Structure formats: C-alpha cells, structure tokens
C-alpha cells in the first residue's frame, strides 16, 4: 500500500480486533503491505498435566498500524478488525513518544508484562542499558523496581524490571509564566517585618515555589 519511506511519515493508529484475532489481523495487514506492530510477551501457563510457554499480546484486543486516515476503508474491511480507536468516528493517532518507547522495550528482549494503567507517579529516565533514554513511571512491587510505560489513548500500561541504579528522577519543567508567578509570591528577607519568623514548614513551602532551573 505504501513505500517504506511513505509509511514512516504516517502516524501510528491503534486498531481494535476481536478476541484472540490479533495475529490473524496482523497477517492480513502484512499481506496488504501495511506497517504494523503487535507487541507481545512470554508467559508460562500451567495445567494439571503440562506446562507451556505462550506468547501473548501486551495489549489484548489491540495492535498498531501506520496508514493514511483519509484512506482507511481497506483497514476497516479486514476480517476480525472491529474498529480504529478514535473519537466521534475520527481516528486518533497514538502518541509518537509512547509508541516508540513500547517498540524499544519489545526490541530490547527484556522481560515485560501487562500492567495496570498508571496515570501519575515518580517519572524517571533510564540512563544505562538497552532502554537508555526512555522515560516512564517508577513503581516498586514486592521489593523490585519496575518502570511503567503507558499508551494513554488505550489507557493501558506495560512494565519491566529495572535496576534502580540505572534511573534518575525527571524534574518537571515549569513554564515561563509559572516561573514568574512563583517568583512574585516569594517574599524577600527585607520585606518581612523583624518580628515575623517563618516556621520550618512555611519555609519549606516557599522553597517549593522557587523556579526550577531549565534542563
């Protein structure tokens, strides 16, 4: 459908498929020469008489595809495909940074797994290893550290274990208007009457309003 160069200029979209039809839809997309991405993970399942290693979708019921949203009819005609994720019947692209992070994680070969969707938390940047440069939310679980990557459009997350020594906190950047507002409410020492003394808790609150230096 598209040349390699053309495909890379197109946005990624999430497509919803029928239960357990992820691989079938991916095969149709491959046959139609679309660029697609079906992130998976390995999981060991035990039955009463046997144990088996399975490869399952990281985002059950979804996969990703690059295409021109104005020419989406061939996508919608694929057997097993339910819909293209969007609002008001209009496809909404997946955030480029989020999809790139998931692709990097899958390409790294590190163990990964689906994770409850995480909206807020301590944001960190990985400074070493196969995931160097990625940013995500740090979570601790059973004494182990995990970095959580999310696809906001689907409200789904994935996680992988990481050495905490490889991560550094990401400080939020304040806008210039926020910096000015914060600076205006910080009283100077000379503006306080001599008899006024800030309690430690008050001083800490004022310190938190100080402008954050740019990265």
Image (cartoon, rainbow, N blue to C red):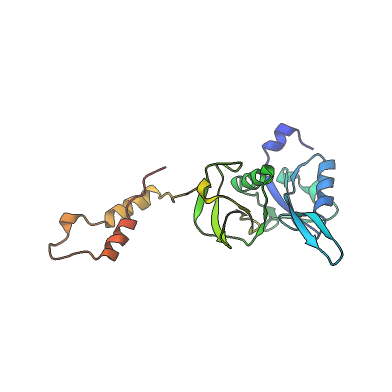
On the image, the x and y values in percent for residue 188 come to 20, 54
Check the image and name the residue furthest to the left.
194
Numbered marks: total: 0
Q: Quadrant of residue 137?
A: bottom right
Q: Is residue 175 left or right of residue 24?
A: left
Question: Residue 163, position in %: x, y?
Answer: 55, 50
Q: Is residue 31 above or below residue 154?
A: above
Q: Is residue 50 left or right of residue 114?
A: right
Q: Residue furthest front?
A: 49
Q: Residue at x 29, y 59 (%)?
A: 206
**In this rendering, position of residue 164 left or right of residue 110:** left
Location of the N terminus (image quadrant): top right
Residue 44, quarter of the rendered image: bottom right
Q: Nearer the viewer, residue 106 or 110?
A: 110
- Say above or below: 204 vs 132: below
Return the x and y of residue 171 as percentages of the image width and height. 44, 50
Nearest the camera: 27 or 199?
199
Image quarter (top left, top right, bottom left or bottom right) of the C terminus: top left
- The residue lying toward the viewer, choosing from 141 and 189, is 141
Q: Position of residue 202 (x, y in %)?
A: 28, 64
The residue at 80%/55% (across/down) is 53
- Residue visible at 83% across and 65% down? 47
């Amino acid at each position: 459908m598209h040349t390699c160069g053309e495909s890379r200029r197109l946005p990624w979209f999430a497509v919803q498929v029928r239960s357990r039809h992820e691989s079938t839809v991916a095969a149709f997309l491959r046959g139609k020469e679309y660029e697609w991405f079906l992130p998976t993970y390995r999981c060991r399942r035990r039955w009463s008489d046997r144990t088996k290693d399975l490869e399952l979708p990281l985002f059950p019921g979804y996969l990703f595809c690059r295409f021109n949203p104005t020419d989406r009819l061939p996508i919608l005609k694929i057997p097993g495909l339910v819909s293209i994720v969007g609002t008001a019947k209009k496809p909404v692209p997946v955030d480029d940074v989020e999809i790139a992070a998931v692709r990097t994680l899958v390409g790294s070969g590190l163990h990964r797994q689906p994770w409850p969707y995480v909206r807020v938390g301590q944001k960190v940047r990985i400074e070493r290893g196969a995931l160097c440069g990625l940013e995500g939310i740090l979570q601790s679980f059973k004494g182990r550290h995990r970095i959580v990557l999310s696809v906001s459009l689907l409200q789904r997350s994935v996680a992988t274990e990481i050495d905490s020594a490889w991560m550094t906190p990401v400080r939020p950047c304040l806008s210039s208007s926020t910096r000015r507002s914060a600076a205006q409410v910080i009283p100077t020492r000379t503006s306080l009457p001599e008899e006024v003394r800030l309690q430690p808790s008050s001083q800490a609150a004022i310190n938190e309003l100080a402008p954050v230096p740019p990265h």
